[in-house]
Image (spheres, rainbow, N blue to C red):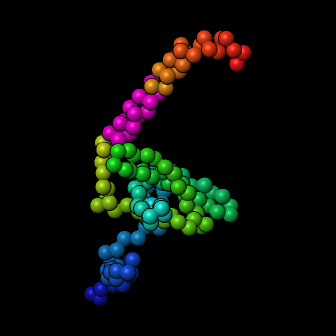
Amino acid sequence: METQKRIIEVNGIKLEVDLRNAKRIDNFMVGDAVKVLIKEYSGYKSHLGTIVGFDEFESRPTIIVAYIEDSYSSADIKFTYINSETKETEMCAVNEWDVPYSKADILSKMDRELHKKEEELRELQEKKRYFENAFGKYFENTNK
């Protein structure tokens, strides 16, 4: 049996791919796990995401992807829109070994961020009460 191999080049590195074992996915559905490669300030960064919708615009059908922007202390959900005019974003299917973090890790980071924002809100409410008490007489004596 003859092997079907193709040589591809990625960032200057040549790879030989056996097409019998290669997997190509041409059909995507809402809910499919994907990776998006997005241009950032210092180059490109890959993010895990999921397809959340398809906009069937007549001139530019668009794939909507929600992706996780994960950093040391937080995890944020962002959206990207991929169509024929998209220049600095690419999308591909997720492989089994592509999951670098767990659901629990992401939820933990989101919980920490939520707690931080709740604390900021509490501090702002305290400042408002202080302003109303400490500066109330000043504004009573002026017509402002």
For this view, does 28 lie left or right of residue 57?
left
Image spot of residue 41 (x, y percent): 48, 61
Q: Quadrant of the C terminus?
A: top right
Question: Which residue does the image show at 35% across and 41% down from the upper left?
Answer: 109
Question: Which residue does the image show at 53% across and 13% down from the upper left?
Answer: 133
Is residue 27 within the magenta segment? Answer: no
Is residue 110 within the magenta segment? Answer: yes
Residue range highlighted in magenta: 106-122
Q: Which of 88 and 125 is in front in this view?
A: 125
Q: Is residue 18 visible?
A: yes
Q: Is the magenta stretch mostly helix, strand or loop?
A: helix
Rendered view: 81 above or below 25: above
Q: Is residue 91 visible?
A: no
Rendered view: 135 above or below 103: above
Q: Quadrant of the N terminus?
A: bottom left
For this view, does 103 lie left or right of residue 79?
left
Rendered view: 43 above or below 76: below
Image spot of residue 8 (x, y percent): 38, 81
Q: Nearer the viewer, residue 18 or 64?
A: 64
Question: Which residue does the image show at 41% across and 57% down from the upper left?
Answer: 47
